[in-house]
Amino acid sequence: MAKIFCVANQKGGVGKTTTTVNLAAGLAKVGQRVLMIDLDPQGNATMGSGVDKRKLELTIYDVLLESATIAEARVKSEKCGYDVLGANRELAGAEVELVGVERREKRLKLALAEVAGEYDFVLIDCPPSLSMLTLNGLCCAHGVIVPMQCEYFALEGLTDLVNTIKQVHANLNKDLQIIGLLRVMFDPRITLQQQVSDQLKAHFADKVFNTVIPRNVRLAEAPSYGLPGVIFDPSAKGSLAFVEFAQEMVARIQKM
């Protein structure tokens, strides 16, 4: 049965999409069956997985409005080795359309139940806000992976996210927990980053993943080629770090 994880952080620009597509590609590389779900109307995770969001006939929007199943709407990213449930601009309208419907925060959970047996991992790229879309992701997830930069403002955003997760855990999804914090865009030469990293480890202990994703030009270049860095340049430091992270995730899940 698939383990379902949201990649979430209410702060924008922290590398959520980069983390989602590279972890998906890394997991596929180490032999896992993966479904990547793009819950952001910008569709960056879709495009970054080698799938053209403009050419999609069915998307996550159709699944949330129950006019299509995941089995009908998913596409295979041949280059990346995982399945994609894509998003495009249409998804922005789902926010309004879901307001008056029944079980609006559980739509994705119900849809995933039909295909969960076909995957080892389901990764959900959430938008940088607590919207109905993010809530759908959090309601069906076993846990949250939090990518964060080791900077002062990132710590403030983390407090908000932890409170959100507590609320969802209490009211909508008793399974939900923080699986771990992933330090991304890390530069050990910057003293502040090292200090924040030490604070994180002191406060969250084993909730901080051992793997650290370094600041890496090749990871930043990869989306312009419509690929995760792990596929675009497998030998880059950032790509190797994401494969290592995928292995750490598999090991952590086996202990759960």
Image: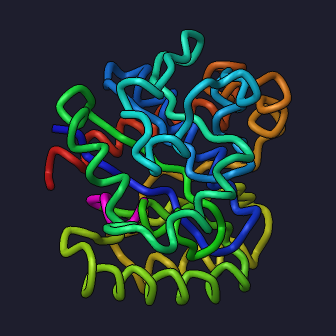
Q: How many marks?
A: 0
Residue at the (79%, 68%) spot, across then down? 190
Q: Does residue 62 appear in this view? A: yes
Position of residue 40 measured from the top left corner of the image (x, y, whole percent): 64, 53
Figure check: 79 above or below 10: above
Figure check: 237 above or below 113: above
Give the quadrant of residue 46.
Answer: top right
Residue at the (67%, 58%) spot, across then down? 93
Residue at the (48%, 34%) spot, across then down? 24
Classify the position of the C terminus by image quarter. bottom left
Classify the position of the N terminus by image quarter. top left
Specify how the rendered protein is coloured.
rainbow
Position of residue 137 measured from the top left corner of the image (x, y, whole percent): 42, 59
- Would residue 209 appear left or right of 228 to someone viewing this image? left
Which residues make up the magenta segment? 137-142
Residue at the (43%, 57%) spot, across then down? 6
Position of residue 224 measured from the top left corner of the image (x, y, whole percent): 85, 29
- Would residue 66 appear left or right of 213 to someone viewing this image? left
Give the quadrant of residue 102.
Answer: bottom left
Q: Residue furthest top?
A: 78
Does the segment drawn in magenta span residue 96? no
Position of residue 182 measured from the top left corner of the image (x, y, whole percent): 51, 59
Who is closer to the viewer here, 243 or 189? 243
Q: Does residue 183 appear in this view? A: no
Q: Main SS type for the magenta part?
A: helix
- Would residue 64 appear left or right of 42 to someone viewing this image? left
Give the quadrant of residue 109.
Answer: bottom left
